[in-house]
Image (cartoon, rainbow, N blue to C red):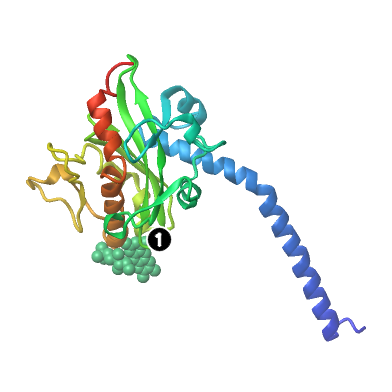
């Protein structure tokens, strides 16, 4: 066979393709466990960040274990989940929202008129993460949230003060929005704008709103309003929808009502 014959070129091309395919597959399979560990760590890092507990160079699992108290709550009534209701192997650290929502035994469908987060299905129960001060008094509760943006489902954590009304932190650990546009939801400068905003009116209505532009000085509703991100109205409207959904009656509303009534914010 001449070295420049068509069949030889084809053979070499196929051989190179086969070698590359094997290398890529081996790398993908070999790196998967490490990717999963990193994803889990990123989630814990975001929980700490939302709760204001993240420091540069921090040992994330160590701080998580020391400062965070996690519990599963049933969304329907906000009560703690009995242990036998939680599938084996599901923990607040490994909780897989998509899988639990899709499973008919652990998820439920949201009626379109109530589906402000555009999720169609959600799990029946969710983890909540509490932070206590040195005296054992609740200082923050960190709630996992999810909802549709423009291109993707966005997953994050919203931290509320022990008054269950004031927002203390907001982070996202997974989304597919466009970097520089919708991806700016990751920008700490935008996330800081949520700090201190009031999610509910005094009579308990969900009031938080993301504007198309900026909050004007002197706006009487400023405590409930957050600046939008220019060029990313669709993503930020998705963020507004998901916050309103998760703080409402189909989300953590029953849990927050119960926590406020039972004085979950008292010392243990
Ligand atoms: C390539 C491309 C990517 C975009 N990515 C986003 C995005 O991630 N989030 C978003 O809200 N809008 C995105 N947009 C813009 C939307 O199509 C839409 O114009 C925008 O949400 C309107 O926001 P504005 O009223 O603030 O300009 C993208 C547009 C293009 C062309």
Query: Vertical placement of 136 versus 80: above or below?
Result: above
Q: Is residue 250 left or right of residue 222?
A: right
Q: Which residue is mark 1?
A: 178
Q: Is residue 81 left or right of residue 254?
A: right
Number of numbered discs overlaid on the protein picture: 1
Q: Is residue 219 left or right of residue 239?
A: left
Q: Residues within 10 Å of mark 1 (few under 14, many from 20)?
A: some
> As drawn, which residue projects farthest toward the top?
135
Res 206 seen here? yes
Which x, y percent locates residue 2? 91, 84
Which x, y percent locates residue 36? 58, 44
Which x, y percent locates residue 253? 27, 40
Query: Vertical placement of 173 versus 47: above or below?
Result: below
Residue at 33% x, 19% y: name it: 133
Query: Vertical placement of 72 versus 249: above or below?
Result: above
Q: Quadrant of ligand 1?
A: bottom left
Residue at 58% x, 40% y: name it: 37
Q: Which of the 4 image quadrants contains residue 143?
A: top left
| In front of the other: 186 or 157 | 157
| In front of the other: 184 or 207 | 207
Q: Is mark 1 within 8 Å of ligand 1?
A: yes
Which x, y percent locates residue 8? 85, 80
Residue at 11% x, 46% y: name it: 221
Q: Which of the 4 image quadrants contains residue 51?
A: top left
């Amino acid at each position: 066979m001449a070295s420049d014959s068509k069949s030889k070129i084809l053979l070499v091309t196929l051989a190179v393709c086969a070698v590359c395919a094997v290398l890529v597959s081996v790398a993908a399979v070999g790196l998967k466990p490490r990717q999963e560990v990193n994803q889990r760590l990123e989630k814990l890092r975001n929980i700490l960040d939302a709760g204001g507990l993240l420091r540069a160079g921090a040992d994330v699992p160590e701080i998580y274990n020391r400062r965070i108290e996690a519990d599963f709550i049933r969304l329907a009534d906000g009560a703690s989940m009995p242990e036998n209701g939680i599938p084996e192997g599901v923990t607040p650290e490994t909780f897989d929202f998509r899988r639990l929502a899709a499973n008919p035994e652990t998820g439920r469908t949201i009626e379109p008129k109530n589906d402000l987060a555009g999720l169609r299905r959600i799990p029946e129960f969710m983890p909540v993460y509490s932070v206590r001060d040195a005296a054992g008094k609740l200082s923050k509760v960190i709630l996992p949230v999810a909802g549709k943006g423009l291109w993707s489902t966005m997953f994050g954590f919203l931290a509320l003060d022990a008054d269950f009304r004031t927002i203390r932190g907001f982070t996202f650990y997974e989304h597919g929005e466009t970097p520089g546009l919708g991806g700016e939801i990751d920008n700490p400068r935008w996330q800081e704008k949520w700090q201190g905003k009031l999610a509910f009116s005094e009579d308990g209505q969900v009031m938080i709103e993301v504007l198309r532009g900026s909050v004007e000085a002197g706006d009487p509703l400023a405590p409930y309003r957050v600046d939008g991100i220019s060029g990313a109205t669709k993503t930020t409207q998705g963020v507004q929808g998901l916050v309103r959904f998760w703080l409402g009656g189909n989300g953590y509303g029953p849990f927050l009502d119960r926590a406020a009534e039972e004085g979950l914010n008292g010392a243990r």
